[in-house]
Amino acid sequence: MPNPRVSREQLPIPDPQHAPATSTDVREQNPPYEPQQPVQPPEGAPNVVVVLIDDMGFGAPSTFGGPCAMPTADRLAEGGLRYSRFHVTAICSPTRQSLLTGRNHHSVGMGVTTEMSSAAPGYSGIRPRSAATLAQVLRGNGYNTGAFGKWHQTPARDVSPAGPFDRWPTGEGFEKFYGFVCAEMNHWYPVLFDGTAPTEPDRKPEDGYHLSEDLVDQAIDWVRTQQTLKPDTPFFAYVPFGATHAPYHVPREYREKYRGAFDHGWDAQREITLARQKELGVVPPDAELAPWAEGVPHWDELDDAERRSAASLMELYAGFAEHTDVQVGRLVDAIEEMGALENTLIVYILGDNGASAEGGLGGTLNEHRFASGIPDSAEYINEHDEALGDPTTHAHYPVGWALAMNTPYQWTKQVASHFGGTRDGMVVHWPAGITERGGVRDQFHHVIDVMPTVLEAAGLPEPTTVDGITQKPIEGTSMLYSFNGADEPDRHTLQYFEMVGHRGIYHDGWMAVTRHGVPWEMVESEHRSYDDDVWELYDTSVDWTQSHDIAAEHPGRLRELQQLFLIEAAKYNVFPLDDRMTERENPREAGRLDLHGDRGTITFHGPGLRLTEETAPNVKNRSHTITARVDVPEGGASGVLVAQGGRFGGWSLYCHEGRPSYAYNYFGLSEHKVAASEPLGAGRHEITLEFGYDGGGVGRGATVVLGVDGEKVGEGRVAATIPYYFAFDETFDLGVDRASPVTDDYAFADNAFTGTLERVRFDLSDDVWSDVASEQARTEFRAAHE
C-alpha cells in the first residue's frame, strides 16, 4: 500500500528513517521492525503506454479519414477519444525530446535532429539535467519502465561503446531498452541495441523476421513478465516505431492489398479524405482544402510512367502503415488478455511530424541518394516495381502524396509554420478514466502536453529536484481536463513553432507564420535571408486549415504576433536561427564536438566493433589510407576486413575468393572495384588502401591504390563519391559488414573475415573539403546530377 505521506517533489524519494534500536536482541525490539517497502505510485495510478508512429501525416490514417487502414487506432478511438488539434514539432528528434520531457524542443537542446546539432544551446542535442524525462519521474515514483523502438535522442558522438551512457534510454529512466538510436532503420536487417549492448536479430527475413514485429514481441514479453512478477506495480511502456519512416519495408501481402488503390491520384485523394474527415467530425463541416504547394505537379500533369511509379510507392507506404498498426493491436490484445486494459492509459500519436516530402517530386528508391541531390526517374522506379518493400529498396513516396497525407493542411514535415508539418492525429484510450467513448476533442494541444497529462492521471506532482538537480518547470499543459470535458475551453493558448527557419506563433486562435524554403530541397545552393521571408496571418477559429492569409487586412495583429514570437523564441533558446540541412550533418560545419576531433590516425584492434557514422572515422571528401594487418590460414581467407554503409551507399575493404579487394558503392547506382590478381598466401600480411581524393569540392572522385606487404597489387578510379552521408541505418564494422552489404561480392550477414584480423589503422588527411570551403563546388555537385 503506497504511503500517502511520502513527498514526491524530490526524486529519488529519500529512504525512510528508522527508529533507533531499543534492544541488543531482536526478540526484544519494541516496536518490532517491519520490512522496508519499495516506492509505489499513488493508489489507482494507471499503466501507461505511449505509441509513436514516425513520418505520418494527419490525413494518412483511417482514424482521421485517411486511406491507410489502421484498425487498432480505429478501435482505440471508438473506445476512447480522437484529438483533432494535436501538434508536434515538424521533425523527429525534437518531437521525441519534447514528448518525454514536457518541454519545448529548444528548451531541451533539440532544435533539430541529433545528427544536425550544433554548439548553440537550443541545438546542442543534449538534454539538460534540469529537464528530467517522463520515464525518470515515473520510475522514481515506483513504475517499471521500458522502451522499444526508435530513440534518436542520444547525442550522436555518444553512440559508441565508449559512451557516455547517461543520455541513452537506460540513462534517461528506462529500465529496459530494445531498439535503435538513429534516424531510421532497415526493417529487414536492423542493427539494434539491447540496453547499451549491440545486438542483431537471430532470425532473417526468409524466416519471417520484421523489425516492427520484433519490437512488439519484445514489448509484450516485457509487460507480461512485469505483470506476472509485480501485478500491483504499474508499468510505462514507450513504443516508438521506426515505421512509417523510409525505408518502406513491409511484408509483400500488405503492399499487395493496396494494388490499384491510389490510381486516382493525390488530388482526388485529398477530396476523398476531406469528405471522410468531415463525416468523422475531426474537421468542421466548412473546412476547406488548404492551397496546393507551388511547384508540385498535379496528378493530371504526370505522364503514365510517373503515375504508375507514384501510385506504387503510395501502395507500399499504405501497406507499411497498416502493418505497423496491426502490431500495435497485438500489444493491446496482450494487455487486455492480462486483464490490465481497463486501467491502462494509452496515448497513440499518429505521427512525430507531418508526412515527409524528403522523397522529392518523383519519389525515390534510395532516400540518401535523393538527399544528396540525385533524383530517380519514374522509369527506374517502375523497373524495380516487383522489388518494392524488400531489402534491395530504400523507398520514399513523392511530395504529392506527402501533401495528400497531410489533408486538409498545407505543406509537410520540416515546415513548422503550417499545420501540414505540425498537426497530427492522436488517440487516447483509458476505460477507467474516460466516460465518453468515441468522442472528438478539439482543444488545442501540443506534444509537450503528454508528460503533464500522464503525471496528473497518475496523481503525481511535477518534481522540483531530480538527482539533486533543480528542475525547470514543465512547459506543457495537462490534457486531463478535456478527457471528460468536450466543451471545456482551451488551456494551451500560446505556442511557438520553429524548424530550420520555418516559424510560427499561435495565440488564442490567431496564428502568424512564415515558411523558409522548400522541404524537398535538402541541399540548397545558397542561403536565403530570413528578412526575405513573407509572414502570413490566419484566424484559425474560422479558418481551420490556414487557407486564407489575412495579413494584409490585419497588419496590427500580425505585428503583435511577430513580437510575441520574438519573446517566446528568446525565452526558449530558439535563436540563433539555423536553416542548414544536409550540410549540417558534417560536425565541422555544424560546430559540434566530433568523437575523433582532429585526430589524424585512429587504430582499431580486432574484429567485432560496430560504430555509427557519427562515431566512425570521417573518410568523406578527403584523402585517407586504410591499413589492415591480417593472418591468413592455410587454404586462404575471405570476408570483410572493414566496411561502412551498405547497398545504398558505402565502401568495403575485403577479401573475395582470397584476393584483397576494395569496393566503393555510389548510392547504389554504381560500384567501383579494385582487386588483387592473386589470393593471399598463408601467414601475416599488411593490406593497404590509399584513397587519393581529387579535391576541389565535395563529392569529387578519387584514385585508389591497393597494396599488399608494401607492393601495389591494384589501382583504379572512383568517379564520384558520396559527399554528405553514407546511411543513417547502416554502420561502420570491423571484420564483418552488418545489415545490407556494400557489394554483392559477399552475402548478407554471413560475410565475416575467415582469417584473423589483428588491427585496422586509418590515416586521415588534414585537407577536408567541406561546404564551407567551397560553396561553388556544392552548386556544381548538384548541377551535375540534375
Image (tube, rainbow, N blue to C red):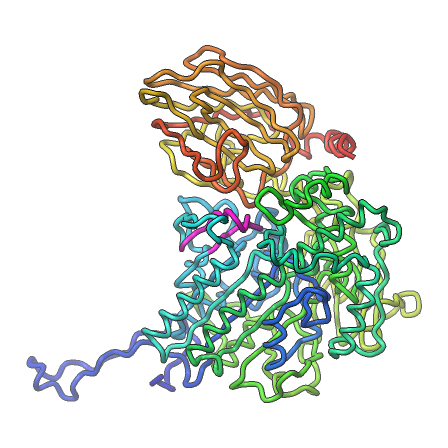
Q: Is residue 371 magenta?
A: no
The location of residue 227, given as percent across then percent down, is: 37, 74
* Foreground of the two, 384 or 563: 384
The location of residue 691, given as percent across then percent down, is: 56, 21
Q: Seen from this angle, which residue lies furthest right?
A: 553
The location of residue 583, given as percent across then percent down, is: 66, 40
Q: Is residue 276 above or below residue 255?
A: below
Q: Considering the image in quadrants, where does the C terminus appear?
A: top right
Which portion, as a residue range, is magenta?
179-194
Question: Residue visible at 67% across and 54% down?
Answer: 316
Q: Is residue 266 above or below residue 673?
A: below
Looking at the magenta stretch, what is its main secondary structure?
A: loop
* Foreground of the two, 429 or 463: 429
Question: Residue visible at 51% across and 86% down?
Answer: 432
Question: Residue visible at 62% across and 44% down?
Answer: 393
Q: Is residue 739 above or below residue 508?
A: above
Question: Residue visible at 66% across and 67% down?
Answer: 69
Q: Seen from this angle, which residue lies furthest top?
A: 711
Q: Quadrant of residue 554?
A: bottom right
Q: Is residue 631 above or below residue 439?
A: above
Q: Is residue 665 visible?
A: yes
Q: Is residue 106 visible?
A: no
Q: Considering the image in quadrants, where does the N terminus appear?
A: bottom left
Q: How many marks?
A: 0
Relative placement, left or right, of 763 versus 671 is: left
* Foreground of the two, 323 or 406: 323
Q: Is residue 184 magenta?
A: yes
